[in-house]
Amino acid sequence: MPEIKKCNFDCGMEKAGYWFRYRTGAIIVRDGKMLFVKSKYGGYYYMIGGGVHLGEDSKSCIERETFEETGVKCAARRIAIICENFFNGVGGLIDGKECHELEYYYTMDAPDNASFETATDAEEKLVWVPIDEFSENDIRPAFLKKELKGIIEGAPLIHVINDERVRRLS
């Protein structure tokens, strides 16, 4: 069997003020809490994960990204959410851009005795947010605040088109 080439470039592109990326996200739950990244741009929470590399499947990506960001080898159990996410970029490389992400969110199995890092490889904090406090926190994309509890409890796969763009008047 021929060896598959590995490529460390994310599936995405930028053109004329628009930014697109294919990414994965991890749903990691322990003791009634879910692990999130706290953004350094605005203090909101988002899911651990990252860009799928060219030639990489989404399951392999979320397992790789979870390990890179938490230091724990987790196994993807099932795909739970497919999201077409549209938003205005804030901070960093996406600041001021109109963003479009295709996102695959997986429920993850983590070893019971695993000790997770407290910051990601990008120096953002990892935070355990109690499931019953999702509505009180700024979790993005915003639809996750109401959908995650059902997903964690075993709801079937959902597809969401999420549009949080602020339209500018010309």
Image (cartoon, rainbow, N blue to C red):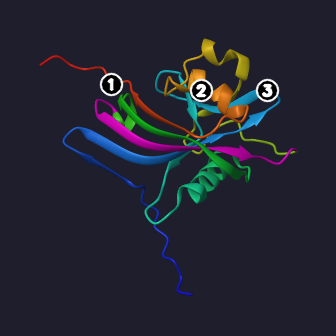
Badge 1 element: loop
Question: In the drawing, does residue 145 fall left or right of residue 127?
Answer: left
Position of residue 15 relative to residue 63, above or below, is above
Residue sticking out furthest to the front:
156
Give x and y (percent) for residue 22: 43, 49
The kind of residue on which mark 2 rests is Glu
* Crowd around label 1: few <14 · some 14–19 · many ≥20 (10 Å): some
Q: CA distance from mark 1 to mark 2?
A: 20 Å
Mark 3 to mark 1 CA distance (whole Å): 32 Å
Q: Is residue 53 left or right of residue 128?
A: left
Q: Which mark is in front, 2 or 3?
A: 2
Marks 3 and 1: CB-CB under 8 Å?
no
Magenta part of the protein: which range? Answer: 95-112
Residue 82 image point, x, y percent: 50, 42
The residue indicated by pointer 3 is 32
Considering only order in the chain, which callout, 1 or 3, is on the residue closer to the N terminus? 3
- Residue 107 image position (x, y, % from top left): 67, 43
Can you tell which of label 1 and label 2 is closer to the viewer?
2
Residue holding disc 1: 165
